[in-house]
Amino acid sequence: MKLIVAIIKPFKLDEVREALAEVGVTGMTVTEVKGFGRQKGHTELYRGAEYVVDFLPKAKVEIAVDDSLAERCIEAIVGAANAGKVGDGKIFVTSLDEVVRIRTGETGAEAV
């Protein structure tokens, strides 16, 4: 099993959710986060004063999937989140050793 964590632009969240649903993802966790990468934030003007916004709003999407579904999920996220601009985001994939459904005690792929 794999844990896929995608950091994307917030306005792309609905598109990513729909793309993942199309490939068979039945659940996900979404968190509003802030951060920056190569774009290093940007400057804004407020009441005539310029200031730097270091941390930009992002959405963090976490999904646990079976190995057979991981590559299709990654492709779906890339396709839906890609705006062709700096700051589109990153995808991190790690192996999951174990998953347990608390309600039933199911483990492994059945728990996902």
Image: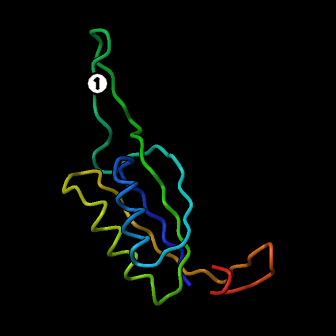
Quadrant occupied by the C terminus:
bottom right
Residue at 60% of width from left, 80% of height from top?
96
Return the residue nearer the eye: 88 or 18: 18
Residue reaching furthest to the left: 84
In the figure, 72 relative to 49: above or below?
Answer: below
Q: Position of residue 15 (x, y in %)?
A: 34, 59
From the viewer's perspective, tell me whether residue 26 is left or right of residue 101: left
Dot 1 crowding, Cα within 10 Å, few <14, some 14–19, many 20+: few
Counting from the top left corner in percent of width and height, residue 42 is at 28, 34
The image quadrant where one finds the N terminus is: bottom right
- Give SS at disc 1: strand
Indicate the quadrant where residue 43 lies: top left
Q: Residue furthest bottom?
A: 68
- Left/right of residue 55 with respect to residue 108 in the rendered view: left
Image position of 56 with respect to 88: above or below? above
Q: Is residue 4 above or below residue 54?
A: below
Answer left or right for 23 relative to 26: left
Locate residue 6, reporting x and y percent.
43, 63
Residue at the disc numbered 1: 44
Give me the residue at 27% from left, 9% from top: 48
